Image (cartoon, rainbow, N blue to C red):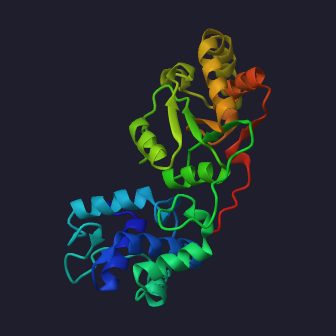
Amino acid sequence: MILHRQKVLLSLIHHAGRPVSDVELTKWAFLIRHEHESCGGSAFYEFVPYLYGPFSFSLNQEAGKLADKGLLTCPSDKTWASPSGRLPHRPDRPTQRGVDWVLRRFGDHSADELMDYVYSRYPQYTVYSKRKKLAKKNVAEPAVYTAGYEGLSVDGFLYRLVERGIQHLIDVRHNPIARRFGFHKSTLNRLCDALGIRYSHVPSLGIHSSDRQELDSQSDYDSLFVNYRRTTLKREADSIKQVSQWVTESPSVLVCMEADPCTCHRTHLAAAVAKETSLPVIDLGTEPDDRNT
């Protein structure tokens, strides 16, 4: 199955009528997301600051998959092209108008001209840039931060951490696997490292998946968490002290899957860490998202 956002990539490269560099493809998609009324359609790519401004790990991974399927070719390193003169998968009309707009507006720009435009308009995406930095990295105030990635792309989730100024991701899932790209332990570790965010996994503070079955109401969750506080949090005092030390050393976030902190054990773990550190608990998912959209 070809996702709608992948159809946008195919259309961009096809209608460019020439080989397209990684930088061009990424920045065109970024501009569609941020400056065209279509925003790329639903579930379009999100972006993080990286070596040459805004970047999408998901876009990069999916372009490679399209090449594996023969829908794209790589005529040279970090360059994409259409394999034939036809476009077998097309985005819907509103999104195609976004493709047409970005190619008409920026298709003749050199990579440097394109980056100059994006850098000047979105300096917050230059904090890791090898080219030039127009903004400084944020550093979060001391607190016990928590976050859930449910419903987010890995790029959108990591942007939230970078924008807030998080320096250490503490994964408190018992079994950190995920079908969605980017949230499996090894991948998340690698992506965090690329952004200068430390990654740690503390499985002993998680809840086994078998204990999370048939949770149909808040009362079911409340019963689960009563047991979690009575067993795991009592038994894992040393692990809690380790997490507390990390939290006081640098801005850190306790991460699990659930978007709603009321249905996630991280809230109760955070309370235990807050008791150790005398720091407030802040869930990043309940704060306003101030990204330009």
Q: Quadrant of the C terminus?
A: bottom right
The location of residue 137, given as percent across then percent down, is 63, 54
The location of residue 68, given as percent across then percent down, is 22, 59
The location of residue 169, given as percent across then percent down, is 56, 37
Q: Nearer the viewer, residue 288 or 111?
A: 111
Which residue is rendered at x = 34% and y = 84% of the image? 16
Which residue is rendered at x = 63% and y = 37% of the image? 253
Total label count? 0
Specify whether 288 is left or right of 29. Answer: right
The relative height of residue 222 versus residue 107 in the rendered view (above or below) is above
Q: Nearer the viewer, residue 161 or 289?
A: 161
Residue 217 appears in the rendering:
no
The location of residue 40, given as percent across then percent down, is 50, 72
The relative height of residue 26 versus residue 196 in the rendered view (above or below) is below
Which residue is rendered at x = 68% and y = 45% of the image? 284
Specify whether 74 is left or right of 6. Answer: left
Specify whether 190 is left or right of 217. Answer: left
